[in-house]
Image (spheres, rainbow, N blue to C red):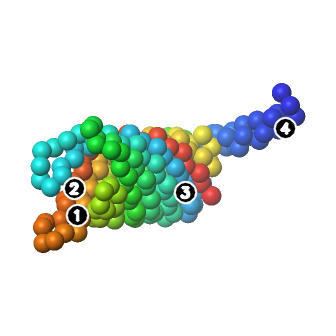
Amino acid sequence: MTSYAACASALVCGLLSMGCASTDSTMTANRLRFGAAIDHTQNDMTFNGGPSMESDSTLIALNGGYRVTSHLELGGAVTYEDVSVEGFPSTESYQLGPTVRYYFTGEGDVQPWVSGGFGIASFDDVTTLDGSYYQFGVGVSYFASPWAALEVSINYNDMELEGDSVGGLPGDELDFEGLSYNFGISVFF
């Protein structure tokens, strides 16, 4: 192993092992969190009130927040979603909105939580559909150190979108609802 690789490996191991003993509430309150997650979502999708179709999505989310107390975090999220429906071309969706997260324990290496959020959404296909979404879920954070946590969660998502009407005809309507399974990492400052 080269000396650069050995130094980098030692630095990463050192950061992850700093304070691997229990993280207490004074270490997690009044801190900023930045996170990134990737998930797989299975939705029931309805277009213009027609029959329900199943869609599969891969979603990338950037999220963050401020831990107001050891239990409560206020934040926001922005997501990009690649949506696939069998027999149709792949499309893209974007969401942006505020979030809230409540940590049940507020201290320790393992911290279960519930979360919720809402906001604006856009779906780009042949036409652009805009609307709103909401989501809520449960998850757990495993603090590998006071500065980094691995996270898993399950969320219920609902998105309702509408497009502009053309030539006096009704506009398009698209509804998604389903579960997403997330895996991510958060860094605390």
Q: In this view of the protein, which residue sits in the foreground, 155 or 50?
A: 50
Callout 2: SS = strand
Q: Where residue 169 sits: x, y (%)?
A: 12, 67
**Would residue 32 be seen by someone viewing this image from the given angle?**
yes
Q: Amino acid at mark 2?
A: Leu
Please say if the residues under marks 1 and 4 sit with CB atoms less than 8 Å apart. no
Tell me which corner region of the image, top left, top right, bottom left or bottom right, holds residue 139.
Answer: top left
Callout 2 touching callout 3 (CB < 8 Å): no
Label at residue 4? 4
Q: What's the amino acid at mark 1?
A: Glu
Quick one: which residue is furthest to the front in this view?
167
Q: Residue at x 34, y 61 (%)?
A: 122
Q: Secondary structure at mark 4?
A: helix
Quarter holding residue 134: bottom left
Name, please, the residue furthest toward the bottom. Answer: 168
Instruction: Identify residue type, mark 3.
Output: Arg
Structural crowding at the residue carrying mark 3, measured as other residues with C-alpha within 10 Å and reported as few (<14), some (14–19) or many (≥20): many
* Measured Cα–Cα span from mark 2 to mark 1: 6 Å
Across and down, in percent, residue 22 comes to: 59, 42
Residues 184 and 188: in front is: 184
N-terminal of the pair, mark 4 or mark 3, is 4
The residue that disc 2 covers is 174
- Residue, disc 1: 162
Q: Which mark is residue 33?
A: 3
- Image depth: mark 4 or mark 2 in front: 2
